[in-house]
């Protein structure tokens, strides 16, 4: 019994040394993103999957690698579509994301928004919703608004909240 444990331990040690022998020293890789400010500003892990997907796609889009890129143009307007929404993004000729206008219909509301609506309007259900995001690199504030139509039997009301579930009163 002792011999089998000793042999097993010896095999494990030899395997560990063998694995290290095949390891390669690779040069370090530095990943830089031109659009990290955008993804930091708008990306929300509690947002619906189509929202996160299109925002990541807009952030990682490479204007310079596109077939219509020419250095003569100052701005590029690129649209990203899914059945539930779209993102219209403006890039400069270096590939930096300048502005976006995002609109998504009938997506899953984040938990904070759902809980806030359920607390303020008990017994009401969501009929439809729209999520709008406006991003601008020059602006200090990113605008994120959920426009929700609630219904309770024959009655319908419209409410607006931000991404935290705070209600926005009509202007």
Image (spheres, helix red, strand yellow):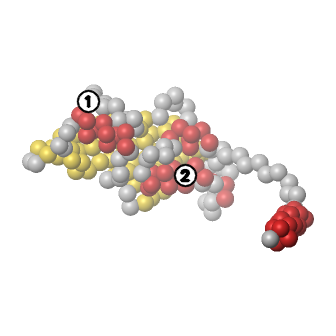
Which percent across, then down, holds residue 58? 54, 51
First in sequence, mark 1 or 2: give its number: 2
Please state, as top left, top right, bottom left or bottom right, where the N terminus lies in the image. Answer: bottom right
Which percent across, then down, holds residue 10? 87, 67
Which residue appears at 83% of the width and 68% of the height?
Answer: 2
Which percent across, then down, holds residue 103? 39, 48
Q: Nearer the viewer, mark 1 or mark 2?
A: 2
User: Which residue is the site of mark 1?
Assistant: 170
Identify which residue, 19 or 68, lies in the foreground.
Answer: 19
Which residue appears at 63% of the width and 60% of the height?
Answer: 66
Q: Is residue 77 visible?
A: no
Which residue appears at 26% of the width and 50% of the height?
Answer: 128
Residues at discs 1 and 2 in contact (Cβ within 8 Å):
no
Which residue appears at 55% of the width and 52% of the height?
Answer: 56
Identify which residue, 11 or 17, lies in the foreground.
Answer: 11
Instruction: Determine the CA span between mark 1 and mark 2.
Output: 31 Å
Which percent across, then down, holds residue 75? 58, 46
137 vs 155: above or below = above
Residue sitting at the far front: 1
Q: Is residue 73 visible?
A: yes
Q: Secondary structure at mark 2?
A: helix
User: Which residue is the site of mark 2?
Assistant: 56
Quarter location, residue 68: bottom right
Residue sitting at the far left: 154
Q: In the image, 48: left or right of 75?
A: left
């Amino acid at each position: 019994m002792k011999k089998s444990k000793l042999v097993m331990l010896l095999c494990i040690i030899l395997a560990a040394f063998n694995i290290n022998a095949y390891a390669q020293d690779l040069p370090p890789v530095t990943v830089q993103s031109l659009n990290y400010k955008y993804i930091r500003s708008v990306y929300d892990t509690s947002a619906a999957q189509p929202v996160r997907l299109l925002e990541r796609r807009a952030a990682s889009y490479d204007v310079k690698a596109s077939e219509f890129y020419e250095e003569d143009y100052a701005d590029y307007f690129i649209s990203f579509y899914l059945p539930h929404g779209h993102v219209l993004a403006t890039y400069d000729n270096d590939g930096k994301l300048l502005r976006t206008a995002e609109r998504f219909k009938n997506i899953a509301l984040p938990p904070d928004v759902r809980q806030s609506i359920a607390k303020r309007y008990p017994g009401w259900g969501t009929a439809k919703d729209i999520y709008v995001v406006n991003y601008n690199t020059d602006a200090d504030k990113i605008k994120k608004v959920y426009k929700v139509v609630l219904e309770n039997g024959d009655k319908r009301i419209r409410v607006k909240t931000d991404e935290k579930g705070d209600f926005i009163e009509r202007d």
